[in-house]
């Protein structure tokens, strides 16, 4: 389904009075502190977050899945759902596809639909953590690290196939996440597993077009629980460095052990010019894939503080990271969940833009710990939602996308169009 722009205008008219009052108050306060509000609103509006195709359906666990109906049952419908989100907030201008869940049957038609919806194709994702129907060799004991060269070659060929699909669609990056590892001590030669993985990645890397990037993702555990071949940012950085200048590390917020200082990892990778991509989610325990900002919003802000510090540094050579959500939950409407996640990301980004970096650096140089904390927490306590709403208003999006989604009964309309038994492909 498509959103009628007139309906957005009518919705905004109902809420414009309160918004104007809140925005004017905040803008006046910021301008008194010599902050260029118009530039701030423009930056917020330009910040785009890619939507993963697999998050458009109801997530699940190994215990069960509780779909709510109206899910996208084809790649075309997935594009339509991302286009719907983008129409509501003008912040989701890209989709990240997962192969083989999202193999396009007609490249030209898919590209045409994406163009019609004002969408681009973000990084493509390979899948060597599942055996596909008819697959002759199994990834049960690993893929790129497998002891059997034939299995490794199968995984390598799959990644090259994913790159080709990405080239056809206009993507510029591939994300490689491996579930490879072991569940028991002695099961795997740890050194040889890493060495074989590096050799396999080198083969895949050789197929990258000149203007492409490879994102090497890491994860400390799951589905293997004793060891993971790429368990942390250091191993990811090691591999990316050995591969070449088109390889970068990808940080998934859920892929860390409890209490890991993720913001310090971000700062280090940006210093090394190796931070390539970000997967946003939130967690209470590990890779919970919860709605962004639902558990640890202050940590999200601190991470963005380091990201903005790096991006605003004119001497930094780290490329602008690829931003993507990687969240999935089985008790929420997937589209509502994504709208909440985008909002949380925008809030953290806007807050980080407000940090007085000169004052912060002066406090640090003087070892004024109290003042440094006050500067950060003062910004974090600032309600920046009027700035985000103003950016949406300028871009002809809904002032409050989630309220619009509910007021116009979009899920009900999707169920009427697709039925209760329409399920998204993938997990």
Image (cartoon, rainbow, N blue to C red):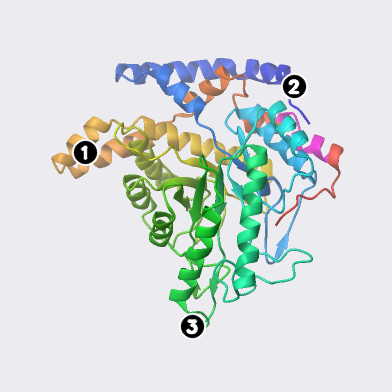
- State the residue in front, 71 or 139: 139
Element carrying mark 2: loop
Residue 60 % position (x, y): 68, 58
Query: What residue is disc 3 on?
Result: 185
Element carrying mark 3: loop
Residue 72 colored magenta? Answer: no
Q: Earlier in the sequence, mark 3 or mark 2?
A: 2
Q: Are marks 3 and 2 in contact (CB under 8 Å)?
A: no
Classify the position of the C terminus by image quarter.
bottom right
Q: How crowded is mark 1: few (under 14 residues within 10 Å), some or many (20 or more)?
A: some
Query: What residue is disc 1 on?
Result: 371
Please identify, in this view, whether the residue under mark 3 or under mark 2 is nearer the observer. Answer: 3
In which image quadrant can residue 66 be found? bottom right
Q: What is the number of the mark on residue 4?
A: 2
CA separation, marks 2 and 1?
A: 49 Å
Residue 75 % position (x, y): 75, 43
Give the residue drawn at x 47%, y 27%. Answer: 44
Is 221 left, or right, of 104 in this rendering? left
Q: Give the range drawn in magenta.
A: 407-415
Q: Are marks 2 and 1 in contact (CB under 8 Å)?
A: no
Q: Earlier in the sequence, mark 2 or mark 1?
A: 2
Give the residue drawn at x 65%, y 58%. Answer: 158
CA separation, marks 3 and 2?
A: 58 Å
Q: Residues within 10 Å of mark 3 (few under 14, many from 20)?
A: few
The answer, for residue 287, to whether it is visible in the render is no
Give the residue drawn at x 50%, y 56%. Answer: 217
Identity of the residue furthest to the left in this view: 366
Classify the position of the N terminus by image quarter.
top right
- State the residue in front, 323 or 26: 323
Is 402 left, or right, of 227 in this rendering? right
Is 391 left, or right, of 414 in this rendering? left
Please identify, in this view, whether the residue under mark 3 or under mark 1 is nearer the observer. Answer: 3
């Amino acid at each position: 389904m498509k959103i009628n722009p007139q309906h957005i205008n009518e919705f905004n008219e109902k809420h414009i009075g309160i918004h104007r009052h809140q925005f004017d108050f905040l803008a006046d306060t910021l301008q008194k502190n010599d902050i260029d509000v118009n530039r701030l609103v423009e930056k917020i509006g330009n910040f785009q977050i890619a939507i993963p195709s697999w998050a458009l359906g109801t997530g699940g666990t190994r215990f069960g899945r509780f779909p709510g109906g109206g899910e996208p049952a084809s790649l075309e419908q997935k594009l339509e759902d991302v286009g719907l989100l983008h129409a509501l907030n003008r912040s989701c201008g890209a989709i990240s596809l997962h192969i083989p869940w999202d193999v396009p049957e007609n490249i030209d038609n898919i590209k045409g639909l994406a163009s019609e919806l004002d969408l681009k194709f973000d990084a493509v994702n390979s899948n060597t953590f599942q055996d596909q129907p008819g697959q002759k060799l199994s990834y049960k004991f690993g893929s790129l690290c497998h002891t059997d060269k034939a299995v490794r070659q199968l995984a390598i060929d799959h990644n090259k196939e994913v790159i080709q699909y990405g080239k056809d669609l206009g993507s510029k990056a591939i994300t490689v996440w491996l579930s490879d590892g072991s569940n028991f001590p002695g099961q795997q030669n740890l050194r040889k597993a890493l060495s074989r993985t590096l050799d396999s990645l080198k083969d895949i890397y050789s197929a990258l077009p000149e203007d492409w990037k490879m994102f090497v993702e890491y994860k400390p555990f799951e589905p293997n629980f004793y060891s993971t071949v790429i368990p942390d940012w250091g191993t990811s950085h090691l591999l990316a460095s050995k591969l070449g200048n088109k390889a970068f590390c990808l940080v998934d917020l859920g892929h860390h052990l409890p209490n890991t200082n993720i913001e310090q990892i971000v700062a280090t990778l940006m210093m090394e010019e190796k931070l390539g991509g970000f997967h946003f989610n939130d967690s209470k325990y590990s890779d919970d894939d919860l709605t962004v900002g639902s558990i640890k919003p202050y940590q999200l802000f601190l991470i963005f503080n380091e990201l903005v510090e790096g991006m605003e540094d004119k001497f930094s050579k780290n490329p602008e990271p690829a931003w993507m959500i990687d969240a999935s939950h089985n008790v929420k409407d997937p589209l509502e969940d994504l709208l909440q996640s985008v909002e949380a990301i925008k809030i953290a980004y806007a807050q980080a833009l407000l940090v007085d970096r000169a004052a912060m650096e002066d406090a640090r140089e003087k070892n004024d710990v109290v003042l440094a904390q006050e500067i950060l927490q003062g910004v974090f306590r600032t309600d920046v939602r009027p700035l985000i709403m103003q950016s949406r208003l300028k871009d002809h999006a809904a002032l409050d996308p989630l309220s619009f989604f509910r007021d116009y009964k979009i899920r009900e309309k999707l169920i009427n169009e697709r039925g209760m038994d329409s399920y998204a492909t993938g997990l």
